[in-house]
Image: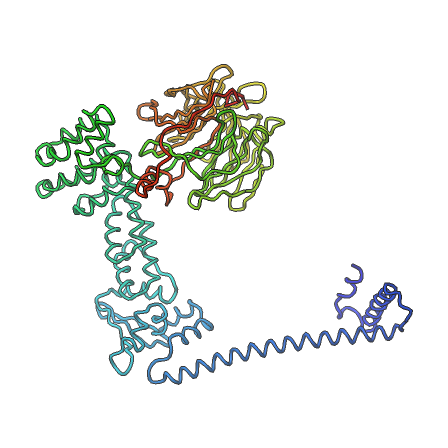
Amino acid sequence: MADGTHRHRNPSSISSSSSSSSSNHHHRVKFQRRRSNNNSGNSNSNGNSSNNAQSQRYNYQQQQQYSRRQQRQRQDLRLSAGRLRAQRVSQRLVGTEVSVVIHVYLLRITLNRSTLARFRAKEQLCDGVILCAAGTHHRVHRVILSAASPYFRALFTDCLRTSPAPPSTIRLEDQPHELVGVLLDYCYRGQCRVTARNVELLLPLADRLGVVGCVRLCCRFLIQQLRPDNCLGIRRFAASYFCQGLEAKCRDYVLRNLGAILRQSREFRELDLAELLRLLGDDELQAPGEELVFEACRSWLEADPRARARDLARLLADSVRWGLMRPEYFRAQVETWEPARRSRQCCKSVLGPARRYLIEAGTQDQRRRLLLLAGQEESSGTWTRPRVPHEILFAIGGWTSGSPTNFVETYDTRADRWYLSAWMDSTPRAYHGVCSLDRLIYIIGGYDGHNYFHTVRSFDPVSKEWRERACMYHARCYVSTCVHDGKIYALGGNSGMTRLSSCERYDPAANQWQLIAPMNWPRSDASAAALDDKIYIVGGFDGQLVLDYVEVYDCAQNQWSYLAFMSQPRSGVSLVAFRGCLYALGGFNGVDRLSSCERYDPESSGNATWQPCGAMLDARSNFATAVLDGRLYAVGGFDGSLPVPSCECYEPETDSWRASAPMNLSRSALGACVLAGLPNAREYSFHREEGRRDDGAEDNTSNDRPRQQQSNGIGGNVIG
């Protein structure tokens, strides 16, 4: 270090003699060391070693200067060659038109966009004029327009030339001066101000003149402006100008928001029959039930009953999937609708068969025969084929038959069926956390019967790939997890040695965990949820007691505080944020499994407390919950004796639960999450099965559950 520091002193701060002395001393020491290392008997004088070192340094400096000189010469030669080629090409094009490519290349080297815009604003070096409405005009640079639009490039070169000299005047006398100015802003600056007032005229003008970048800018603006009252009009507008990306976005928006469109859009009643049939017959229409589809048919027909009455039978037959409609609604609304009753063809071909299928048929065999008589097939006919769900529920892992499992099942709410997935993780685990974020599923911590995990895995349902993620600071079984503000929180749990109060937060972008403030009380087998910029955790087990404590974490302050206690202690509980409230469901109170539920409203006036709400049909603990299609689902769990496959759904309007289809596999200590808008949602729903039938493959993912072995394993009956 001392030698290096001495060598790199500033030469101006010391005399030349001292610098020479220091340099000689340094090289003398270096030479002596080399001599001793080599065991050489030869010796050189200090003066000779100093001269040799100076000579070597001088040669090195000369080589560096020569290399830099050579590099500058090569750069100058390349620039000169480029200028020479440009001059030669320009000379060949004299009298016709200078090459657009060469001009644009030189402009990119010497000018920036703001400079070009100033030239246009001051009308400097302009060589063209655009004539607009009301006798107004814009002076422009033809080379800039040619670079922005293939239309102008062809106009100013040989492709469209009809006169000896290229045109310098462009006539757009049907276009307003301000609108053309906005388009020119994009040509010169690469951006322009698109508003609701000008977009309807700007997009056609940009499309007409081939300014593709401006067309894309208008499409992005229109996507941001999509609302139930304008989406149909924007879709028709996009189709007129072949904006396929915008049209696809409009289609997706319409399919997801049919109910709001019926309430707010006048354009829906102006659709022609073909457009309406395409919309209502689409498999991807996101309607909570076929009742809404019938309401759409009724609304459209009643907008012009005389002209549209003749299309009623075809509309109802091709749009509504009658086999999926509730019988009580059919009796109350469909059969009593006067236009349908007056139509003989409608009664004969639609209402009669639908009534026999929904109301009169008592067995599945009778319904199958009625479908065949109505010209439908049970597997592919439109009457009973469910639509593609917008949201898919994934149930992953858990405890079954005395050991953990890596099974993955998906639930199709439209078909009310569970399907086994082939894309399972390699490691079985139970008592883990499951979260969804950015269309990825994260599996956090857990237990495989021997090891307590601190590992994290992610699954991409589109590419079907499992990946390892950054590990947590602590191993966590019976962990409580939730997602807030783009980050995953892992709270408490059991490390295999002790119950934890520590908490950590995962940032997917950085693939890194960060410790946050610990809870006031250690707990495992609790449950957490995020609501209104706060994180709540309820219940659990501290190693001695089942807890009724509730804590809330302030993300801004990084601080935990206590909240109103639940009405009873709960371990293996499930906490869900649903419609602005917190729901604590089921669990184990130290004696019995619970079916009771309670609700907490943070916005309630006065001191908020936990209030009882509708009890579940079955008592259960260590189960999974998810919000799907505006309803709350409870999945699997432990009933005190065995893991169960049963599932149920909470109806907030009636404050009651109803049974839904059971899983294929009985299990507890599982995790579940919901993913919306998957581009390959068909692969996780009824339509995967339909595709297999089309290929002639045997379907092995029916609702028949595999045999369950009797087990006295932990199965959820051990408090975490």
Q: Is residue 602 visible?
A: no
Q: Nearer the viewer, residue 720 or 383?
A: 383
* Count of marks placed on residues: 0
- Residue 151: image quadrant is bottom left
The C terminus, quarter of image: top right
In the displayed orientation, state which residue is furthest to the top.
591
* Residue appearing at x 77%, y 74% in the figure: 56
In the depicted structure, whether residue 298 falls above or below residue 582: below
Q: Nearer the viewer, residue 391 or 303?
A: 391
Q: Is residue 199 left or right of residue 520?
A: left
- Pinpoint residue 193: horizontal percent, then vertical percent: 34, 58
- Pinpoint residue 552: horizontal percent, then vertical percent: 50, 29
Q: Nearer the viewer, residue 18 or 626?
A: 626
* Residue appearing at x 83%, y 68% in the figure: 27
Q: Is residue 93 left or right of residue 621?
A: left
Q: Is residue 344 visible?
A: yes
- Pinpoint residue 542: horizontal percent, then vertical percent: 57, 22
Q: Is residue 260 left or right of residue 715?
A: left
Q: Is residue 456 left or right of residue 96?
A: right
- Pinpoint residue 646: horizontal percent, then vertical percent: 39, 24
The N terminus, quarter of image: bottom right
Tell me the colour scheme of the image: rainbow
